[in-house]
Image (tube, grey):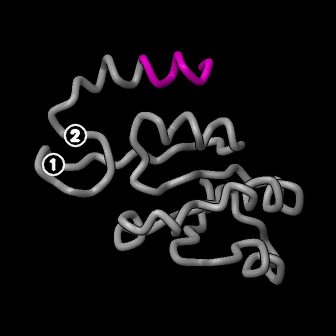
Amino acid sequence: MFSMIDMLGVENPLRKMLPMQTKPDVVVIHKGRDEESNKKNIIRYKNIAKIRSKFGSLISAAEGLEYNGVRKAYFNGADIAILNVVAANDPNVGLRENANFRQLMTSILNEVGQ
């Protein structure tokens, strides 16, 4: 069994986690749907190194990630990238539901060297 904490809307995840007596296995650095359209609201990848140095947890990035976002998350130290699947006509960021997922996942994994 694994424990996971989602930091949706938390500006400084490390500050919130410091008082914790038990570390989570996974920390999700998360940007909400309502923040996706504002380019100033980005995932602060610097939090990955800070959290990992104090807690040693796996770090997940979730922000409506699409193909290029997975590469960015991985190269900034995320262990897990949560992909967002959206309808073909959805204005939100993500992979379109009508995409060829078998081909897309193979391409993404090859790009990050997995």
Secondary structure found at label 1: loop
| Residue 56 x/y as whole percent | 82, 53
* Contact between labelled residues 1 and 2, with CB atoms less than 8 Å apart: yes
Mark 1 neighbour class, 10 Å CA radius: few under 14, some 14 to 19, many 20 or more: few
Residue appearing at x 28%, y 26% in the figure: 101
- Give the position of the N terminus as an image quadrant: bottom right
**In front of the other: 108 or 38:** 38
Question: Could you give the CA–CA distance between mark 2 and mark 1, rounded to whole angstroms?
Answer: 6 Å
Residue 47, by quadrant, is: bottom right
Tell whether 27 sits left or right of 16.
left
Q: Earlier in the sequence, mark 2 or mark 1?
A: 1
Residue appearing at x 66%, y 52% in the figure: 59
- Give the position of the C terminus as an image quadrant: top right
Task: Give residue 44's mark.
Answer: none
Above or below residue 76? Residue 6 is below
Query: Is residue 112 part of the magenta span, yes or no?
Result: yes
Residue appearing at x 55%, y 62% in the figure: 42
Instruction: List the residue tagged with mark 2.
Output: 96
Instruction: List the residue tagged with mark 1.
Output: 87
- The three-letter amino acid code for the residue at tag 1 is Ala
Q: Which residues are magenta?
A: 107-114
Tell whether 61 sits left or right of 18.
left
**In front of the other: 91 or 3:** 91
- The three-letter amino acid code for the residue at tag 2 is Arg
| Residue 4 x/y as whole percent | 60, 62
**In front of the other: 12 or 59:** 12
Mark 2 neighbour class, 10 Å CA radius: few under 14, some 14 to 19, many 20 or more: some
| Dominant secondary structure of the residues highlighted in magenta in the image | helix
| Residue 90 x/y as whole percent | 17, 54
